[in-house]
Image (cartoon, rainbow, N blue to C red):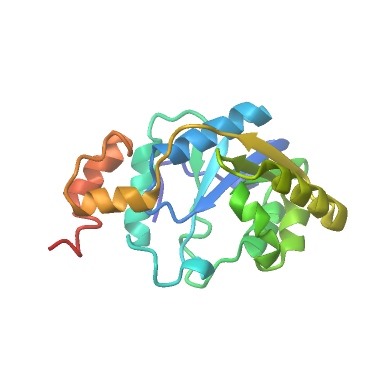
Amino acid sequence: MEASTDKCFDFTQASPGPLALYGGTFDPVHRGHIYVARQVMAALGLDKVVFLPSGQPPHKVGHVRATAAHRWRMLELALEGEEGLYLSDYEINRRTRCFTADTLTALDRLCPAGTQLVFIVGADSLMELEGWYRPGVILEHARLAAVVRPGIREEALRRECQRLREVYGARIDLVFCGGQDISSTRVREAAQKGCALESWVPERAAKYIRDEHIYQEARS
């Protein structure tokens, strides 16, 4: 899969300073993902976020509905005209399972000296980070931008952040986000029913989902 030249990010040409990575299956991408990227950019003073769609995520084996090619194309369409938002095919083109620790290690090595990786995670994922593969390596190679949604137990979250700092020397920024209560699960369910998706999914991506009949394979 190849992205348009203006959106496919080349890590070897990264500039000095922080560079945010936003991983996930994006099955499908929706407006909430773009909202989170924008909130992180604003909160941390960043000029770009690179979306890093996964190919074979180890924690979702058998649960990714759209093909890698479809998920990639939906992201391309969703990010058209979105300044500062880019794509990387590093994980989605790999035929083996991708672990975040391995990806961050590889991308950190690809980037020029002075580039500092920032990995975007949900606050709920941060609370479970020690269950991930080689969490110490993740925290060695990237600063974390933990996205905090309404309803999270903030006191428990801050305690965990402090513990990770003490144990691993973690660098963690909390980014508080409200609104945009959208999930890929809800979008898939709506697509299966033939509902309009434009309120949740950028228009070009919504049209692609409709035209390609994605997520409708189980429709009765």
Most extreme residue toward the left is: 220
Q: Residue at x 22, y 41 (%)?
A: 207
Q: Quadrant of residue 107?
A: bottom right
Q: Where is residue 101? Give x, y as percent.
A: 67, 62
Q: Residue at x 26, y 41 (%)?
A: 206
Q: In the displayed structure, does residue 83 sit left or right of residue 107?
A: left
- Along the line of sight, the residue nearer the viewer: 211 or 59: 59
Quadrant for the C terminus in the image: bottom left
Q: Is residue 98 in sight in this rendering?
A: yes
Looking at the rendered structure, the number of numbered marks drawn on it comes to 0
Q: Residue at x 39, y 46 (%)?
A: 29
Q: In the displayed structure, does residue 137 sit left or right of residue 175?
A: right
Q: Residue at x 62, y 47 (%)?
A: 123
Q: Is residue 14 in sight in this rendering?
A: no
Q: In the rendered image of this protein, does residue 61 appear above or below residue 17?
A: below
Q: Where is residue 155? Give x, y as percent.
A: 72, 43
Q: In the rendered image of this protein, does residue 81 appear above or below residue 59?
A: above
Q: Where is residue 68? Give x, y as percent.
A: 37, 60
Q: Quadrant of residue 114?
A: top right
